Image: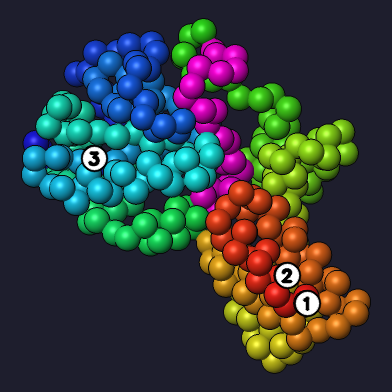
Amino acid sequence: MSEQQFSRPGAVDLSGLAPTPAPQAGTSSAYAVTIDEQNFQTVLESSMSAPVVLAFFSPSRSPESVALADDLQTLSNEYEGKFLLGRVDVDAAPQIAQAMQIPSVPLVALVAQGRPVPLFQDAVPLEELRTALDQVFTQLATQGFTGRHQPRSGAGPVDEESGEPELDPRYAPAQDALAAGDVDRAVAEYQKLVDANASDSEATAGLSMAKVLQRTQGVDLDQARSAAAASPDDVAAQTMVADLDLLGGHVDDAFTRLVDLVRRTTEADRDTARSHLLDLFAAVGNDDPRVQAGRRALASALF
């Protein structure tokens, strides 16, 4: 395996690998796939629409790298398409490790729009993985990169050329607006989808996140934190910092701040804080374990 350092973000030279138009069988979960030389190019190409996380491991040389890949597989199901996990056994696929210039295992890399960036070069606990991924996906969302992978189960329409599941075109106008930095238009586009179908959870989550971006445009983080510290019961000041925490990937901090605010306030202020927290729950996703914990904490604060 190459001893060169991991390459900087940019195009990966895969000319030495045999291209194949579609991924092979071997997925071990809905959002994970075993990488080999035949499907590697296709998996990388899927990062143009939604993030791909590559976990490089070696059962013979690094048992902890296998455990790390298993934890990421657990998270891939939990995140329901926010990323596709590609598991790369460097013993079975040494050419891929060489092409990606992997110096050692474990190593985890993010690929977004074809550009690889290293995330971890050591085994880390599951909660640390989750926190880091939250921060990454929140940052990508602020750049308008909000696509999701479809389950790798063969369900849904598939693009004939790439072999990848087709993205739902309903979300394209909103995602294009985010990519162009037009947050107001993204809010309007997501609102149209929610108005048309209130049960569309993806549109609801997109609308909630777009509103967070809209509310925080041009806000100075330090000034916002100072204002919140000076006025702990000021609902506007506290909700602003909660929004900023969410964008920074500090999801639990955002939820805790607003749960505590609900507990301290009454009547209209309490209802405003509660409604804002529910909106942040929607932005993260109602199936997220942190949202479920936040709902329990909110219920405790209300009664």
Q: Residues within 10 Å of mark 2 (few under 14, many from 20)?
A: few
Q: Residue at x 50, y 45 (%)?
A: 78
Magenta-tinted stretch: 137-159
Q: Which residue is mark 3?
A: 56
Q: Which residue is mark 1?
A: 303
Q: Does the CB distance between marks 3 and 2 fall below 8 Å?
A: no
Residue 175 can be seen, yes or no: yes
Element under disc 1: loop
Q: Which mark is residue 30?
A: none
Q: Quadrant of residue 243?
A: bottom right
- Closest to the observer, 124 or 169: 124
Relative to 249, residue 259 above or below: below
Residue 27 location, x and y as percent? 37, 26
- Closest to the observer, 63 or 130: 63
Number of marks in picture: 3
In-image side of 106 versus 79 (left or right): left
Relative to 127, residue 205 above or below: above
Q: Residues within 10 Å of mark 3 (few under 14, many from 20)?
A: many
